[in-house]
Amino acid sequence: ASPNVCSSHNNTTQHTTQQLWERKRRRRRRFVLEEEEEEEEEMTSGGGKDDDDDDASTKVVVKEEEEKSEKQLARAREKERKKREKMEKERLKKERAMEAAQQQRGGVVVKTSQTPPVDLDAVSGTRDFFPEDYRLQSWLFSKFRSCGYQSGFEEYDAPVLERQELYKRKAGEEITQQMYSFVDKDDVEVTLRPEMTPTLARMVLSRGASMILPLKWFSIPQCWRFEATQRGRKREHYQWNMDIIGCKEITAEVELLSAAVEFFKSCGITSEDVGIKVNSRKVMQSMLTINDVPDDIFAPTCVILDKLDKIGAEAVVKELTETLELPRDTAENVVKTLSCKTVEELERMATEAIEKSGAAGGDTNNSTAQKTVDDSSIRELKELFKLAEEYGFGDWLQFDASVVRGLAYYTGVVFEAFDKAGELRAIAGGGRYDKLLSLYGATSPVPACGFGFGDCVIVELLKEKNLLPNVEKRVDFCVCAYNKDMQGKAMKAASLLRQKTPPPSGGSSNVDGGRNNNSSSSSSAVVVDVLLEPKKKVAQTFDYANRIGARYVVFVAPSEWENGCVRIKDLRAEEYAEEDADKQVDVKFEDLWKALDIMRENENQVRARRGFASL
């Protein structure tokens, strides 16, 4: 462009800019004049305002603020509505994508109505266990069972429905108020069991003298309590129960504590993560008697004392004075007892209390009797800690006089496992209950002790510590037919793969010499999945096998079948093989029962040939 053109362009631009600035200046001036006129009008109409006018102005301001708040709330509601709409759109988009992918695979699609005729969520306080959840629960239960069996315990179970009378012990326990109870069609008062120990007592008494003592039993029952749900607490939960019936020595409690500690260790939890508080109901009863608490209210007193961590010392004192009508000094002394953190401290406090009681002119004989009882229970506690040290888990235990447990039937040592980080409620708890069987018909006391270990809290703890395993679905073989005509033959192949010994036609007479005795896969059964509807494309078959987590694909095709074999391909062969011939093996019908070993042997050979480490 020439200089003249540029100059003309610049002049035009400058002129346009000046026009814009002039228009903006005029608009600002007009706006200021309008504001001044409005202010003058307000001054003219509002001249001579008094305090009442000031109040009116205040009301206007308040009203404006209220209107502003309402507008803010409206904006917040609108924002939330848009957020929900966005989430719903994303959900529908994801659902449509999954539906399209499923249709592409040739599968069935489940579509859910936006307004289903029933509530699709589980009942409040309960849980659905989808396969991935159930795999984790099965892993946890396997840990419970392993620790039980290793300690020489036997597993038992019982109906989840029990008679209400089994739990109505008239001791002020919350459990009686939390039962899922009803009257059945036989007019019997029944309930979903809130705990397992009374059921165990009923079962033991039902066989009576025929039982060989001591019994060492464990169970993993589902229990039901209608209570406030929170982290680690549901209205239904599973609980690992371990009990010893017929042993009066403290060694029984030590054996139970050892099993609990072994479980923690098996999950990777250490004594830095979890501790076990230990106390004695016998000691507590002595201290309560010394403090003039009548024996007949000992059990309900313990129920209230068990609330110390939940409601605090002052609230416990208030409940003791108002509910049980104890003098305030007595209630405060009882709560003070719970602050002891060592057995020796408790012993000193007991001695001082007895001496004080004697100096006050109390019943000397009664004081002496209580001194004897107190000494024996303290010796018992000391013995427990000594044996725990020798057993190798002494660092897990600590004395805590505030642990009394809320159930009325405990009579001796009580204990409670807790999260040292203080994030969770009690992980497990238990103790001695020598008088429970007498409540249900035993003619003389039967020594017993046990613990309950819920599944909810321990899962939360394992999450906190990043110790939950990734329990994936396991499928060894996915059997796929070439077409519909080969479907029956594919099912035949699946049947042979599931065998643990050679088929009768295999020529082997050693029916015990199969996989259970001499193969690397003897630890568990082979998992075989059958593709029920043959896919049109091989890629779809592989896609299905990958989605179910299969390690090997078994192709049942006419050419291989006519030669008396099927072709098995390793879907993870890329880790060790390059050639297709190294990734697949043709296995004869009579060898399908040991196909897993054949595939592993092939992998080892390929690894050895290529210089990789063997399995």
Image (tube, helix red, strand yellow):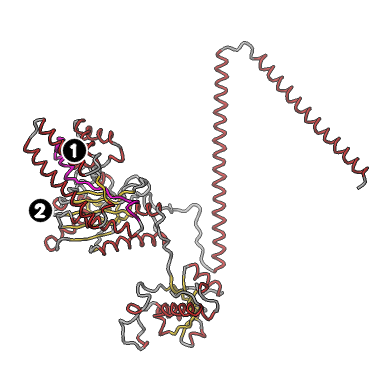
Q: Which residues are magenta?
A: 269-296
Q: Residue furthest top?
A: 48
Quarter of the figure with the C terminus: bottom left
Say which amino acid is labelled 2: Ser
Q: Residue at x 35, y 50 (%)?
A: 234
**Residue drawn 54% across the image and 28% down it:** 66
Whether the magenta-drawn stretch holds residue 276 is answered as yes
Q: Secondary structure at mark 2?
A: loop
As drawn, the residue found furthest toward the left would be 365
Picture quadrant of residue 177: top left
Q: Disc number at residue 349?
A: 1
Q: Where 133 sits versus 333, above or below?
A: below
Residue displayed at 51% across by 66% down: 108
As rendered, which of 430 and 505 lies closer to the eye? 430
| Residue 445 x, y percent position in the rendering | 12, 52
Q: Position of residue 518 (x, y in %)?
A: 34, 79
Is 553 within the magenta?
no
Q: Mark 2 vs mark 1: which is more N-terminal?
A: 1
Q: Judge from the rendering whether residue 56 lies leftward or rightward of residue 138; answer left or right.
A: right
- Total count of labels: 2
In the image, which disc is placed on residue 83?
A: none
> For numbered disc 1, what is the local secondary structure?
helix
Residue 21 x %, y %: 80, 32
At 41% across and 63% down in the image, what residue appears?
471
Q: CA distance from mark 2 to mark 1?
A: 33 Å
| Quarter where residue 15 is shown | top right
Q: Is residue 416 left or right of residue 601?
A: left
| Residue 304 in view | no
32 on left or right of 143 = right
Which residue has dot 2 on it?
A: 444
Mark in front: 2 vs 1: 1
**Amino acid bearing label 1:** Met
